[in-house]
């Protein structure tokens, strides 16, 4: 028996779905970025002094400060002795007490129901009702470990348990957030890509949805359509008419609606407003208002950016009662989402009210973060469009730009020779030459023959300004070396 | 189109693996317990004043107090303004600073690496090396959202991506912790039950392992053996000789070793010691010390009982480097485990040292919790064996007793008539008559023709004492009504 033969798990026996799975946001380029950071620490000379991690929407990592009220409530829940401290405002104490009273044994160290604390679910339902102008039922709210976990739980319900032509088809936008393609790979499900129209500001055209589902129908059982609004990585925002069309399409083809709305607080255009799928569904009335819809939300984005707490929730409406019971059951073996993440969510959906002690600070901190992000969104759009060989749709929402790069033929050939996609090749060159870590467009999928990269708009504005222009221009030279 | 036809998800179209999945710890009896609590609140008269939730190892829910040091470090990480407070001990501040320095942007609100913070992984490796007397590599440590998430991630690697006779077989003890059967259902994998020997203190006999795998081989591809030590729900603890036998068996059949060691701090017999699979593997030397082993640990059990923080980790050794890379990649789409849970783990594996400010309190609090649990373990064992019609193996470890109940034939018939397993019938009667919520043995699987229930040993000792005896005796009358 050779040493090879000793292993249970080899590349031959490893779950092929795991081999297939890709999650570019933390892919090879990010591994290389970490290596470069180590090299810099070890004294290796580089054309830059630090790596700028523009690969991931990790707000606090790029210097954004936590919202004080959220952290005060969290500290009070964590260490209730602080409830006696005069250093903490009364409204934070009241919120912490309310959360603790919802916890068994008044400790956030006890398990909650698998759907989350009822007090938090009620607060979320109130927030949604206020946002949309339509009621929301706390029983339809299911908290999760970040939005990702909630998304995968809903996808799990939709799997067919079969392979081949009977596997579950999920319509996903291209470009998409790679959680979806990763989950589809892991589940052995079937991706049904529909292309967003880059030429028209990444618009979502129903004719393209029809093309996509028609092509896919012989190959799988289409079960759901995923819409990411505001768009990741595109930065686009859907208007109400567009949402109406998607809902009608889903109804026509009997698809479960999955609305990824985690960037609902991140809208940068004055004339643009976030409209939820839930609201439009309600406005449309029968028969649409009875359609199954899951909308996902996260504590990690918006103005709070509390990624590390892994807070998230789904509002899942119009499930058959028996299906809902199975849904609850299916998440019960996970026990419950982290309670501190649930508490973060509570502070987001139930913030201080006018007149309360923390109100002014909360509103100012929230406005500051959003104003900075807005400035960066506009700056980034302008920056990319000022560079020859790059074009970029307006960053209307979310936290990313997805500029298209026009690579010379020789650069494309050099990439192919190196066994990389052309945009991977570009992103690796960008990283090695400038220290800016982005994600190749191929990681989000893209229209064949087009090349992009995704960058967050999170780095501090000073980091983004003049140096970046110079760095990206410098990169042009790198690319042109292959011309 | 009828209203039925409007739903994408019906019992006919729902993922059959989800329908199959059962997680008894939060099953129908727990739903009924919550209803009874609501009834009591609404003024409905019951033969008891409160529901005793003995169904789940939820330490703080039953009155156990958090360890002060853990919560202090957590509060400091959450709200670093407290680092300036004289109310917090210096060692807690030092630990919080160390964790925050490991976090990007020095915030626990930023994402960590998907494997967790390196500082925590290093501390875990030190803890394991000290525990076992053999080195541990921080790169082999992967933090998770509770142990459950870590267990499912490792199981995912072992799936075959195929069904029928080619599906992955997981050997699981009977009785087992139902996470395993739930995950096997969800994954469409194949359970290979091996029976623990109740007559010999729930011992694990290799002849039974051989029987089980021989029977299963035509029906699946056996990939792994799960051992829960200390045992849940059995309360048994394996000795070194027994572990050696299991390792040799796994080697003989080329199985991946999955050691669920979350109760490693919960040992109640003076003459008994927890020995890890990792330690025994190392002691055995070649070829065994190159076997693939995953050992799982949790922040939710032991003396800390911080269930709500969802902290956990796996030490996974001897993976092929390429397989390890795929493992890391496969968890990357989950982004990272909750950072506050990672911080809890850090406090457990790297507690205050002698001479430090928090040392005495930490040691006293830890010893108090463990002493109380030990008293309860002994009390519960004695209690059940004092009741006619119940027998119970010694609770040597973990947090549960799994007494066998001998039901009269008429009670069994009545249960069948009610469409329940006899032990469900018993547990429902126990709940309705006494308010004690336990889990039917069938939820953990059991040898055909035997009936059990699982109860935690967590309720406060006063709650467990005389009233319980009376209540369980009262129950005997309930059962005898069917005799």
Image: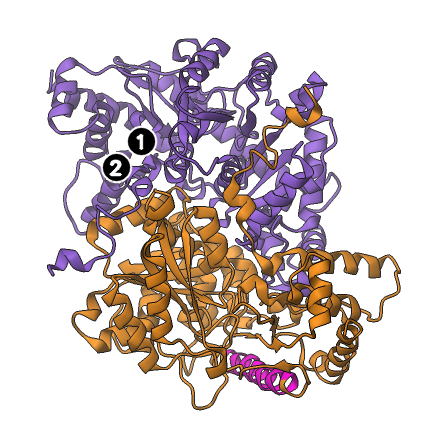
Chain colours: A purple, B orange
Q: Which image quadrant is residue A7 in?
A: bottom left
Mark 2 vs 1: CB contact within 8 A: yes
Of all chains, the one bearing label 1 is A
Q: Is residue A369 visible?
A: yes
Which residue matches tag 1?
Answer: A439
Q: How packed is label 2: few (under 14 Cα within 10 Å), some, or many (20 or more)?
A: many
Residue A66 seen in render: no
- In the picture as drawn, the residue positioned furthest to the bottom comes out as B271
Query: Please, is residue B12 above or below residue A88 in the view?
Result: above
Q: Where, by quadrant of the figure, is residue A297 drawn?
A: top right
Residue matched to label 2: A29
* Residue B449 position within the rendered picture, expressed as x and y whole percent measured from the top left: 57, 70
Q: Position of residue B123 (x, y in %)?
A: 35, 67
Q: Is residue B375 magenta?
A: yes
Q: Is residue B100 above or below residue B252?
A: above
Q: CA–CA distance between discs 2 and 1? A: 7 Å
The local secondary structure at tag 2 comes to: helix
Give, as a single range, the part of the protein colored magenta.
B361-384
């Amino acid at each position: 028996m050779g040493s090879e033969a000793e292993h249970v798990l080899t590349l031959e026996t490893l779950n092929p779905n795991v081999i297939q799975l890709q999650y570019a946001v933390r892919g090879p380029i990010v591994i290389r970025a970490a290596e470069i950071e180590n090299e810099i620490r070890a004294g290796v000379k580089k054309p830059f002094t630090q790596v700028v991690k523009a690969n991931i929407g990790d707000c606090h990592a790029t210097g954004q400060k936590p919202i004080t009220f959220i952290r005060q409530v969290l500290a009070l829940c964590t260490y209730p002795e602080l409830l006696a401290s005069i250093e903490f405002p009364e409204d934070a104490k009241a919120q912490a007490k309310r959360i603790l009273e919802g916890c068994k044994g008044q400790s956030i160290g006890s398990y909650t129901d698998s759907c989350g604390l009822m007090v938090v679910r009620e607060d979320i339902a109130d927030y949604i009702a206020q946002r949309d102008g339509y009621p929301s039922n706390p029983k339809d709210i299911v908290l999760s470990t970040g939005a990702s976990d909630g998304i995968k739980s809903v996808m799990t319900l939709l799997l067919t348990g079969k392979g081949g032509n009977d596997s579950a088809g999920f319509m996903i936008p291209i470009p998409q957030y790679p959680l979806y393609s990763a989950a589809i790979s892991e589940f052995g499900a079937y991706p049904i890509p529909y292309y967003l129209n880059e030429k028209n500001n990444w618009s979502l055209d129903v004719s393209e949805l029809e093309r996509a589902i028609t092509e896919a129908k012989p190959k799988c059982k289409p079960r759901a359509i995923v819409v990411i609004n505001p768009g990741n990585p595109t930065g686009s925002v859907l208007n109400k008419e567009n949402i109406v069309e998607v809902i009608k399409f889903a109804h026509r083809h009997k698809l479960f609606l999955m609305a990824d709305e985690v960037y609902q607080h991140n809208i940068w255009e004055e004339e643009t407003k976030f409209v939820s799928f839930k609201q439009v569904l309600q406005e449309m009335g029968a028969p649409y208002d009875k359609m199954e819809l899951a909308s996902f939300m996260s504590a990690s984005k918006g103005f709070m950016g509390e990624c590390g707490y892994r807070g998230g929730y789904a509002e899942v409406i119009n499930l058959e009662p028996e299906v809902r019971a199975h849904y609850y059951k299916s998440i019960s073996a996970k026990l419950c989402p982290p309670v501190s993440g649930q508490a973060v969510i509570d502070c987001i959906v139930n913030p201080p009210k006018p007149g309360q002690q923390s109100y002014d600070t909360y509103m100012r901190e929230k406005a500051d973060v959003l104003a900075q992000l807005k400035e960066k969104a506009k700056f980034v759009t302008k920056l990319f469009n000022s560079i020859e060989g790059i074009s970029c749709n307006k960053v209307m929402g979310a936290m990313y730009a997805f500029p298209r790069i026009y690579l010379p033929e020789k650069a494309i050939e050099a990439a192919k020779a190196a066994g990389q996609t052309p945009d991977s090749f570009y992103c690796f060159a960008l990283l090695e030459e400038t220290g800016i870590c982005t994600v190749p467009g191929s990681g989000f999928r893209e229209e064949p023959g087009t090349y992009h990269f995704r960058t967050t708009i999170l780095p501090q504005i000073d980091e983004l300004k003049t140096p970046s222009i110079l760095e990206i221009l410098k990169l042009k030279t790198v690319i042109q070396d292959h011309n």
